Image: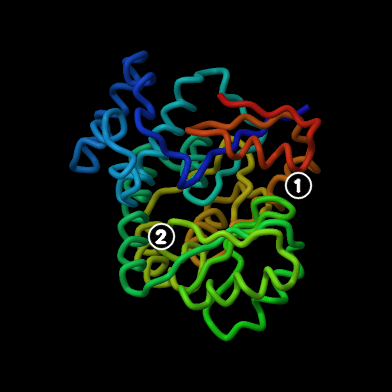
Amino acid sequence: MKRAYVFPGQGAQFAGMGKNLYDGSADARDMFEKANEILGFRITDLMFSGTDEDLRQTRVTQPAIFLHSVILANSLGADFAPDMVAGHSLGEFSALVAARALTFEDGLVLVSKRAQAMQKACEKQPSTMAAIIGLDDDIAEGVLAGIYEVVVPANYNSPGQLVISGSEQGIDIACEKLKEAGAKRALPLKVGGAFHSPLMEPARAELAEAINQASLNAPICPVYQNVDAKPVTDPEQIRKNLVAQLTSPVRWTHIMQNMMADGATTFVEVGPGSVLQGLVKKLNRDIDAYSA
């Protein structure tokens, strides 16, 4: 019987997020105020009383989700006793801080730099993403390989749910071709750009410098990383995988399968929303999954 803690990524934000933590704990208040200081603006004002539009700004969204997740994990105290952790995209940084591979301060600085670098990459070239529902991954991969525009698998979320990423023209072509190949739906997503695709290379290069300078420690438990879905405890391998993450797909289906194969019987989602619990249940309805 093993417990896996999982941390959500971009898209899980909501107005008012984290206010109950701030109001209910002096430690949480201190962490939020430290974050305001590090970021150079009062992100707490935007999290607690900002609009949905405020929270959709990448420079706000990513640190906000990170803060909610990490401070919630910290509030669990001794109850936070993971046998393994993983985070979806941005959530990998939350997972690494919760597992003590990164300090809170260093993790927040990296997340802020990541958000800004991704925003700049998005502005360089119009690009987007789409969710493909009801098609086997291998069929989708074959279709994408035959398209002569930038379009690649970005998030393997669960069997039959794949997010693709690329140029606007590439996504348009792919959506049509994937529906022809049998996809039940191909839904363009309202995102700022082509995350986890080659179009994020400028952001990867910019973030790599910061990641390579950050101090990384051995985590308190294995971290199943997005790039290869394997459990990692070696700090230098963690660093290498973090650098590769921005231009590589999130192998979430494979992470969940590997965690279950390694004995995970309970999944605890730490952060806003409940998307990751739903993805666990799609793989195995009998697995226990709930919010922290």
Label count reads: 2
The residue that disc 2 covers is: 212
Where is residue 257? Give x, y as percent: 76, 47
Q: Residue 276 versus residue 130: which sits nearer the camera?
A: 130
On the picture, is 81 further left or further right than 57?
right
Q: Nearer the viewer, residue 77 or 117?
A: 117
- Residue in view at x 61 percent, y 25 percent: 81
Q: Nearer the viewer, residue 130 or 264?
A: 130
Name the residue: 57% across, 18% down: 79
Compared to 144, does 291 lie above or below? above
- Look at 48% across and 33% down and name the residue there: 272
Label 2, secondary structure: give it. helix
Q: Quadrant of the C terminus?
A: top right
Q: Which mark lies nearer to you, 2 or 1? A: 1
User: What kind of element bears circle 1?
Assistant: helix
Badge 1 amino acid? Gln
240 shown above or below 48: below
Q: Which mark is residue 141?
A: none
The three-letter amino acid code for the residue at tag 2 is Asn
Question: What is the quadrant of residue 256 in the picture?
Answer: top right
Whether residue 151 appears in this view of the structure is: yes
Looking at the picture, how far across and down is residue 215, in whole percent? 40, 49
Q: As displayed, is residue 4 above or below residue 144? A: above
Quadrant occupied by the N terminus:
top right
The reply to whether residue 228 is visible in this rendering is no
Identify the residue under disc 1.
257
